[in-house]
Image: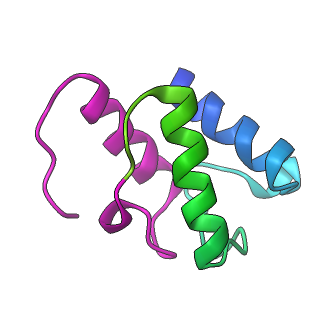
């Protein structure tokens, strides 16, 4: 994938200690066992590292890592992004 995905992967494996083999583009945030507090922390860390804000509509427990990556990349390009 791209550098955004690499940042996501790094955050999940280091900060949240998700095993590397569980992190993949089609993994959902629920499958990675991120609860609501962890999701909020994940969004804040992403904003700090990438510079764009991941809103809650694009970070539900059923959202895949590929979808998070696509959303953040669109925001970084300055594209308007509606709800999923």
> On the picture, is 2 further left or further right than 23?
left
Tell me the residue at 73%/52% (across/down): 23
Which residues are drawn in magenta? 55-84
Q: Quadrant of the C terminus?
A: bottom left
Horizontal and vertical percent position of residue 17? 88, 54
Tell me the residue at 64%/29% (across/down): 6
Q: Quadrant of the N terminus?
A: top right
Where on the picture, by quarter, is residue 29? bottom right
In the rendered image, is residue 46 in sight? Answer: yes
Tell me the residue at 66%/50% (across/down): 24
> On the picture, is 65 further left or further right than 74?
right
9 to 41, vertically: above or below: above
Q: Which of the two residues, 30 or 21, is positioned nearer the viewer here?
A: 30
Queried whether the magenta region covers residue 58, the answer comes back as: yes
Tell me the residue at 44%/72% (across/down): 60
> On the picture, is 44 further left or further right than 37?
left
9 to 56, vertically: above or below: above
Where on the picture, by quarter, is residue 57? bottom left
């Amino acid at each position: 994938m791209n550098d955004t995905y690499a940042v996501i992967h790094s955050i999940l494996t280091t900060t949240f200690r998700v095993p590397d083999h569980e992190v993949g583009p089609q993994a959902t945030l629920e499958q990675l066992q991120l609860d609501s507090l962890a999701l909020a922390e994940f969004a804040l860390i992403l904003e700090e590292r990438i510079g764009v804000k991941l809103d809650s509509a694009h970070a539900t427990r059923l959202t895949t890592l590929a979808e998070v990556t696509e959303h953040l990349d669109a925001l970084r390009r300055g594209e308007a992004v509606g709800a999923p």
